[in-house]
Image (cartoon, grey):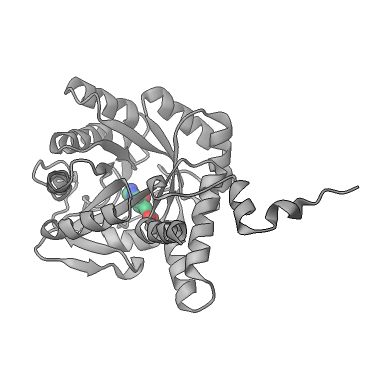
Amino acid sequence: MFTRHRRLRKDSSIRSMVRETTIMPQDFIYPIFVVEGENIKEEISSLEGNYHYSIDRLEELVEEVNKAKVKGIMVFGVPDHKDECASAAFDENGIVQRAIKRIKELDENLFVIGDVCMCQYTSHGHCGIIKGNKVDNDSTLEYLGKIALSYAKSGVDMIAPSDMMDGRVLHIRNVLDENDYKDVSIMSYSAKYCSAFYGPFREAAHSAPKFGDRKTYQMDPCNSREAMLEIEDDINEGADIVMVKPALPYLDVIKMTSDRFDFPIAAYNVSGEYAMVKAAAKLGLIDEKKVALEMLTSIKRAGADIIITYYALEASKWIIEEINK
Ligand code: PBG
């Protein structure tokens, strides 16, 4: 006697009924890049199909996001001015702060997440304050708190710290609470690895470090138990959602997280993962739509509730087309 597993694969109807994982537009968060200037919608060469937008062109973007039924966006700023302490990052009239206000003006129901980090805004390109030749943890916290507060004042729904300083979730939570922003939530980049997959993003955001690397703050790709400690700490410090980043090369870490913690999990399908699929598709080596949807499904199957992806709009369109077929 053997089991006929193939019975439940007989046709697409039964296959869809026994399907364990489905991805939907509401699973996705779309990262966007906002630049200074006017009338700019410029394709990002390292992230084909994604654009640098000036504030006055955000209306088109908001329309597209709504059409795709995507519920949330994550805002990254590309400022004109950089200095030692990232002052443009906490300027209440800064690029991200104005973008948040504009997006909320266009659609108050679109969920807006602000990435909190300093690397796009510092002259040295590191994610914190430099003392000697090191990124200093505790003095950085104060600046991260200022950035988070300025986003909250602009109307952001959620803060996403991506700097990897210790204690930042607790500090940001305290700053938000003290200023009566108790309903602004925190999605922490808890297990953020020091990954080579961020290359295309750094080109898009002009955020590569000018000296050294990020190994003293981002996690060693060889470790997964350490990721559980990072995640546990962030939960205890007050995070509302924890994140694993990148996604595809760290599916084991996503799975470990979902096995251990009854907590919402996000995964960041980062720029390098996206760019690899785009490039292979361009060479005619793979079927882009099928590979992209399989990749996103695998991230959800591993345990992610939310997927931050440059494919958010395209994948949503493909999924909606499939449902309407
Ligand atoms: C900023 C930040 C980075 C990414 C998100 N926030 C780059 C980095 O840490 O160097 C990467 C996202 C991507 O590659 O898509 N700290």
- x 37%, y 30%: residue: 240
- Answer above or below: position of 238 versus 289: above
> Is residue 115 something one can see in this rendering?
yes
Q: Residue 30, percent across and down?
A: 33, 52
Task: Say if 108 sits above or below 179 in the image.
Answer: below
Residue 267: where, in percent of width, then height? 45, 45
Number of numbered labels in the structure image: 0
- The x, y position of residue 296, in whole percent, is 49, 54
Residue sitting at x 27%, y 52% = 66
Q: Is residue 86 above or below residue 320?
A: above
Q: In the shown orientation, is residue 238 left or right of residue 6?
A: left
Q: Is residue 258 left or right of residue 45?
A: right
Report which quarter residue 164 is drawn in: top left
Figure quadrant of residue 185: top left
- View extreme (bottom): residue: 283
Horizontally, residue 290 falls left or right of residue 97, namely: right
Residue located at (48% from left, 61% from top): 292
Residue 256 position, x and y percent, is 58, 37
Return the residue nearer the eye: 213 or 169: 169
Residue 131 appearing in the image: no
Which residue is at 36% across, 25% downward? 238
Viewer-proximal residue among 98 and 26: 26
